[in-house]
Amino acid sequence: MATIQFDNLGHSYHPHPSKPEDYALRRLSQEWEDGKAYALLGPSGCGKSTLLNIISGLLVPSEGRVLFDGLDVTRCTPEERNIAQVFQFPVIYDTMTVYENLAFPLRNRKVPAADVDRRVRQVAEALDLTADLKKRAQRLTPDAKQKISMGRGLVRSDVAAILFDEPLTVIDPHTKWILRRKLRQIHEEYRLTMIYVTHDQVEALTFADKVAVMYEGAMVQLGTPQELFENPQHTFVGYFIGSPGINLMPCTLGNDHALVDGIAIPLPERAVPAVGGRVGGKFELGIRPEFLELTRSGSAGAIPVQVTGVDDLGTSKLATVRLNNHTLKVRLSEEQEIPALDAAIRFPTRWTKLYRDSHLVG
Amino acid sequence: MDKVQDNRAWFLIIPVFLIVAFSAVVPLMTVVNYSVQEIFGPGQTFFVGTEWFEAVLKDDRLHDALVRQIIYSLAVLAIEIPLGILIALGMPGGRSAKTSLTLVLLALPLLIPFNVVGTIWQIFGRGDIGLLGATFRAIGIDYNYTNNSAHAWVTVLVMDVWHWTSLVALLCYAGLQSIPPAFYQAAKIDGASKWAVFRYIQLPKMRGVLIIAVLLRFMDSFMIYTEPFVLTGGGPGNSTTFLSQYLTQMAVGQFDIGKAAAFSIVYFLIVLLFSFIFYTIITRTGEGEKK
Amino acid sequence: MTLTLEGVAKRVGAEQHLHPLSLELQPGSFNVLLGRTLAGKTTLMRLMAGLDAPTAGRVLENGKDVTGKSVRHRDVAMVYQQFINYPAMTVYENIASPLRRQGKDKAEIDAKVRRTAAMLRITPYLDRLPAELSGGQQQRCAIARALVKGAGLLLLDEPLVNLDYKLREELRAELREIFADGKTTVVYATTEPQEALILGGNVTVLHEGRMLQTGPTGDVFHTPASLECAQVFSDPPMNVVDAILTNDRVALSDGTNLPLSAHDRNLPAGPCKVGIRANHLTVLRRSERLVPIRGKVALSEISGSETFVHLRHGDTTLIAREEGVHSHPIGSDIQVYADPDRIFVFSSAGQLVAAPNWRRSALRNIA
């Protein structure tokens, strides 16, 4: 177990980086708590794998330091840091049985045989692998193999953190949730620091206590799944989390409201003081489809719109509406009626967000 | 699938069929024919059944040649396979000029015609004009492959190793390159030593490729003819006369056609047996890995 | 084109990869093949394309029998899971290749290539090699190449499965627009029920080589003919509980009683299986009619904008849906509410007996 600290950490593959775009991982200073589950979420090329490899020791950063429990481990190898890593595809030793696979890291460290046996059986029990211990590891299904990979990390009682690099990639979609549940259970039981890299928001949000959303090398927001959903600090977070992502419209500012094509939309109180005075920048109004209200025109605060499409998603409905030439999406429950002719939308101030140059205001 | 296409396809393979029949099938049948007949002269043939086969199996000189051949093939395997693996482990990976250069250098010995290989070593080993021979003479070793059996054997073996180890190395290199880096990373994280990495990751992953290498080298060395023939002529005496050379002597030198025909069929069956064994091992390994 | 399959089946050795099925695809329609991995989707697509011949049955294009005709003589284009492009040709050349083979002249090729590239939004990449593009762009190139051919039948075999989540969402919406013009008959294979619902059109559900049901997507989803079909076409899986129907209630095996509703009121009494989708097992009690069920939280699966709570109830696991993002501590007690108006009743053999009433929602494009 260890608290992990990033001190001005950055990485570039260029020998002499001059602009932010040259960096695979941009300047990052943060402290992560011990024993929590973290997810690094972002699209391909956002820098999440780079950060993971720096944490595990497979990559030495070009700038800054990484500290475990206050100790500088920036140049330490993975085994010196006591890290375990699970990769995209199962990495197992083909010639060994499941038992031998799990025992391997302990035997390499010259742990006495009795202890090895105890730990291996304990971990096998936790991962539901006890029945398979004598089998050749090669013959098991991919999800069982990934469990073995995980097990090799768990057997080591002094392991500082377990890192997962998109581990469910090769798992059949039908069995993915079983492994997700197992990961969560393991975390509850062992209380180890676990760091999970993925581009799939469902995996990140299900697995982690805190999710770090990454975009173009920068960590854009670190928060609980609920915080990321209800209060996205950056437009990218709004876009990437949620299915579909946040609705965004360019706007200008009035006194205490936003103006979209001249239509006034009320802003939440905390955004208003920031607005007063001549402030420059590109402003955007954002609201999630789940919070945008669809009603009939004529009610208070309702802005008339045209309904251009409705999708039946089985469990809910997704309506596409048009406000002048802005397209917005509204999520509705299965039973909700959709007015065909006199539809209107309402922006509850609690969920309306104002963004300036992509960052949340207020 | 298309009916018209099917019929036309048959016509396309007739030329190949004829060539194969002409160059392989008919001669094979002729050999079988010879192996069960005694030939006194043109037109005078006499069916002798299995007599030639019995003669072949009782032939002492053939037994000697067979033993020599087996020792030779095993020695070749014992040296070339581990050496090839070692070279493959040491080769640079990735796409760089260094890699390309190494690959080209390794491929060079494989491109030389076999009789030229024999000639190169023949001259190389000579005491008067050969670099190796002269060097030995200069440091006091009385190296002479023409009248010393041990020297001849060593020279023939070294020549084969020089000629063919590259093949094993290149095959193993291909096998190694296909191992994803994640395996090495995981091994590092598990604290595995270099030997453990070799034993538990590299060697198992090279299995398919190694079996091909062993199969190829075994069969080729079991049928070896040109290089030792050019180098030593089979000598001194019989010490480097291997099976194929003995067969040629019998057929062409002594014109013992019947016996030679029987012998070549036996030879063919031995090679076929080993090929079958290796093939079964390969396919069973393949299936095991698929599961 | 109209593609008709009459009793086609595929047998390989002793295994029946595809049991006999019949299907008719209308010209310009969008058809989804839904099923788990190894359900037979790829086998069926290969039969439709002409890459394989069926071991039984006939394939007809526009009424003409083309069974056994190789793919070269068929009017078909295909897009695969792996982004397949000619690696040595530029994107432009890739897209142009089918047209060159058709012998079109240069000006026409250029116009068509540029138009298709614009549709797939890869115009800036026309001069690049596929290896220089990202995964999503490579797949767009492959789709463009398939589209430009102007074939009557376009087959897509899980084309988005190797892409990032968000990219998948975007490309899916774009594909829907591109195929909305109704000129090509499209067949799209997927393992995800969500994708089938979003894409719409018609769906054919496959399971273990058998066709379970086919029809408009909404119909099949809301009225699955069997329990098997309901399970394949549900994500998360449908909650299924054994029950006994009596004259005045539905008695679930765990003791919970559900009142009868309009759709299951007049059914004969007896044992049955009751199915309820996760979104009708809610955490909030919206009306008095909902029946409470207690359990212990096993997992909160957070899916973008909603949370699926897995709870242990007796010796089964139920899945309930909650709006928004919430996390519940594992092992805590939770009460969820079942909507008796929304239960599916299946016979003990798994056949649909009663499905909740539903109204086909408003047309996709109103304006």
Image (tube, coloured by chain):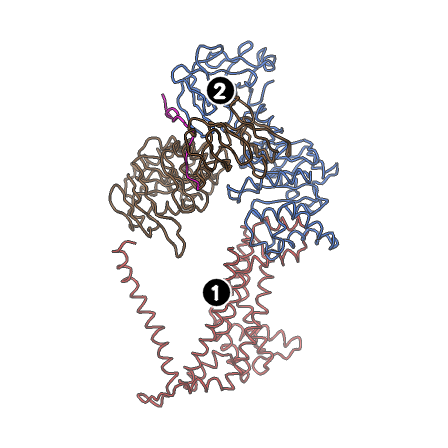
Chain colours: A blue, B red, C brown
- Asked whether residue B213 is drawn in magenta, I would say no
What's the residue at 42%, 78% (across, down)? B265
Where residue C255 appears, x then y in whole percent?
55, 33
Image quadrant holding the N terminus of chain B, namely bottom left
- Our reading of the magenta stretch's main secondary structure is loop
As drawn, the label of residue C274 is: none
For label 2, the residue is A249
Q: Quick check: can you spot residue A30? A: yes
Residue B145 left/right relative to C248: right
Tell me the SS state at disc 2. Answer: strand
Q: Quick check: can you spot residue C91? A: no
Q: Is residue A274 above or below residue C88?
A: above
Where residue C133 appears, x then y in whole percent?
47, 39
Tell me the SS state at disc 1. Answer: helix
Q: Chain of mark 1?
A: B
**Which quadrant of the structure image shows residue A216?**
top right
- Asked whether residue C365 is drawn in magenta, I would say yes
Residue B245 or residue C141, whichever sits in front: C141
Instruction: Name the kind of residue labelled 1 in the image.
Output: Leu
Q: Chain of mark 2?
A: A
Marks 1, 2: nearer the viewer: 2
For label 1, the residue is B111
User: Are the residues under badges 1 and 2 in a single subunit?
Assistant: no
Q: Few, some or many C-alpha atoms within 10 Å of disc 2 (few <14, some 14-19, many ≥20)?
A: many
Where residue B6 appears, x then y in whole percent?
28, 58
Q: Which residues are magenta?
A: C349-367
Instruction: Name the kind of residue labelled 2 in the image.
Output: Met
Residue A180 left/right relative to C12: right
What's the residue at 52%, 58% (across, down)? B288
